């Protein structure tokens, strides 16, 4: 059911508590599932992607008990029990991680998902697993889900794969590396995108006891070792934090996000620095981020390859700046939940923005706010587009989105949080 979005009646004054990072949670769930012994994960994210990951682990006969935001996982000592159907639904991260994990079992598992996920590319990961000795058989279209995966004679060694398509391929292979007799050495045939996410992977793996992880410019190595059960607290989601922080930049006022600060494990926490470049005032501590704005915003030129999930967020801010913004280095986000360049630009044009799609990003040339107008915008099954549209609606009346429920993928409570920002109850 579509949703008409309210505009802000004045500047914002709010404190927002953000739930745990789904990116960190899904890495920690995999490490815990493969570990020896029992692990406890605290501050677990509640979004659909996390639920899909847990359900897939249970389909591999991993014992996962969830109570509130805490999960207890009994590990498989690197020997998951295949044979089931692993339904990732719309979660690209889950599908890619589970494809690699399934290769540790000698019994084939079927990795599948909803129709939009089955359209997303998986071939580089499938090819890499085959190079390692896994059995990978597509059901319909090569390089896409659904696909049968099993270990066969998977020993590890050196594999080649592109680094500029998705860092999730790299992460998926890294996380099974400790359980391959020869470890794994990834030879990147193109520059690595979203490098901070690979650093997150290495950090989480190390927290579970993996050793011998080396990240170079063109190669990534993981030596044979193992994961040990542990207690791990998940950092608040810096990608989600970008939305209330951007709301302050757009509507004016001051918003404080609690639960993630600087330094942070997640590269997306650096979004406060981007907003500072655009004219906002910022404050950071180890546990919080604050953005304040008087409404004066300036355009920037920025390579967002290391913060690619926040391209829609930045675009929402950029349309209210007093000069153009060019976002580059993100051509690969065309293959996310949506075409995050083409679909984003088309939506911006639909409400009167001057936006141009470019080979590796987009250019936004601001127009007077009075020329912007409401319209029904499509989310394209993409939670990040939905939340970006909701930011623009803070100052542009009449914006309707067609699938508000899609935010459940990462932040099910976003609409309540947005309402609390507008009515002041978030303080």
Image (cartoon, helix red, strand yellow):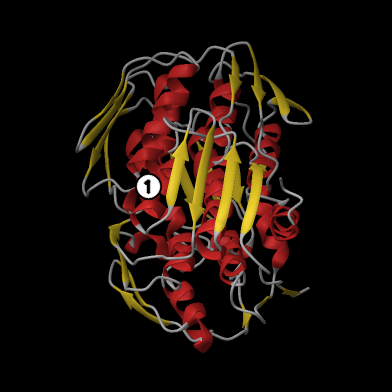
Q: Quadrant of residue 4?
A: bottom right
Residue 237 point in image, percent of width and height: 56, 40
Residue 94 point in image, percent of width and height: 57, 44
Name the residue nearer the viewer: 324 or 71. 324
Image quarter hosting the C terminus: top right
| Crowd tier of the residue under label 1, counting other residues whose Cα lies within 10 Å: few below 14, some 14–19, many 20 or above | some
Which residue lies under the disc numbered 1? 273
Whether 54 is drawn above or below 122: the answer is above
Name the residue nearer the viewer: 291 or 168. 291
Whether 243 is drawn above or below 62: the answer is below
Q: Is residue 1 visible?
A: yes
Asked which secondary structure carries label 1, the reply is helix
Q: For the view shown, which residue lies furthest in the front direction? A: 294
Q: Report the residue at 48% width, 37% height from top.
A: 100
Residue 208 point in image, percent of width and height: 50, 17
Q: Report the residue at 56% width, 17% height from top.
A: 35
Image quarter hosting the N terminus: bottom right
Q: Report the residue at 65% width, 66% height from top.
A: 10
Whether 252 is drawn above or below 233: the answer is below
Q: Report the residue at 32% width, 53% height from top.
A: 305
Name the residue nearer the viewer: 246 or 41. 246
Q: Count how many numbered circles sit on residues in the image.
A: 1
Q: Quadrant of residue 329?
A: bottom left
Residue 384 point in image, percent of width and height: 55, 60
Q: Is residue 134 visible?
A: no
């Amino acid at each position: 059911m579509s949703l008409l979005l309210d505009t802000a009646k004045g500047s914002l004054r709010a404190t927002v508590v953000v739930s745990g990072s789904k990116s960190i949670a899904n890495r920690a769930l995999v490490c815990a599932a493969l570990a020896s012994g029992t692990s406890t994960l605290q501050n677990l994210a509640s979004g659909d992607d996390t639920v899909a990951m847990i359900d897939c682990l249970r389909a591999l006969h991993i014992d996962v008990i969830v109570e509130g935001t805490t999960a207890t996982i009994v590990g498989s000592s690197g020997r998951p029990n295949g044979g089931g159907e692993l339904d990732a639904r719309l979660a690209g991260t889950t599908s890619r991680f589970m494809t690699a994990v399934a290769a540790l079992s000698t019994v084939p598992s079927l990795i599948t998902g909803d129709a939009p996920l089955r359209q997303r590319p998986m071939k580089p990961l499938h090819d890499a697993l085959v190079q390692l000795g896994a059995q990978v058989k597509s059901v319909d279209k090569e390089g896409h889900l659904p696909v049968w995966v099993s270990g066969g004679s998977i020993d590890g060694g050196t594999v080649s794969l592109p680094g500029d398509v998705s860092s999730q391929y790299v992460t998926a292979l890294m996380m099974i590396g400790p359980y391959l007799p020869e470890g794994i050495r990834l030879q990147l045939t193109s520059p690595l995108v979203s490098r901070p996410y690979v650093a997150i992977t290495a950090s989480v793996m190390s927290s579970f006891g993996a050793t011998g992880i080396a990240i170079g410019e063109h190669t990534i190595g993981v030596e044979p070792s193992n994961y040990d059960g542990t207690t791990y607290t998940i950092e608040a989601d810096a990608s989600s934090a970008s939305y209330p922080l951007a709301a302050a930049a757009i509507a004016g006022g001051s918003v404080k996000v609690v639960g993630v600060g600087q330094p942070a494990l997640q590269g997306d926490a650096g979004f406060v620095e981007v907003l500072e470049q655009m004219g906002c005032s910022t404050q950071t501590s180890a546990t919080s981020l604050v953005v304040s704005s008087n409404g004066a915003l300036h355009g920037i030129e920025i390579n967002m390859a290391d913060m690619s999930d926040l391209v829609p967020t930045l675009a929402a801010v950029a349309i209210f700046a007093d000069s153009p913004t060019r976002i580059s280095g993100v051509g690969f986000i065309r293959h996310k939940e949506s075409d995050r360049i083409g679909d984003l630009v088309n939506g911006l044009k639909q409400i009167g923005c001057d936006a141009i799609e470019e080979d590796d990003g987009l250019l936004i040339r601001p127009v007077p706010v009075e020329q912007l107008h409401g319209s029904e915008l499509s989310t394209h099954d993409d939670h990040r587009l939905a939340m970006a549209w909701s930011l623009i609606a803070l100052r542009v009346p009449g914006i309707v989105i067609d699938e508000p429920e899609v935010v459940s993928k990462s932040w099910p409570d976003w609409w309540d949080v947005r309402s609390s920002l507008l009515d002041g109850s978030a303080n």
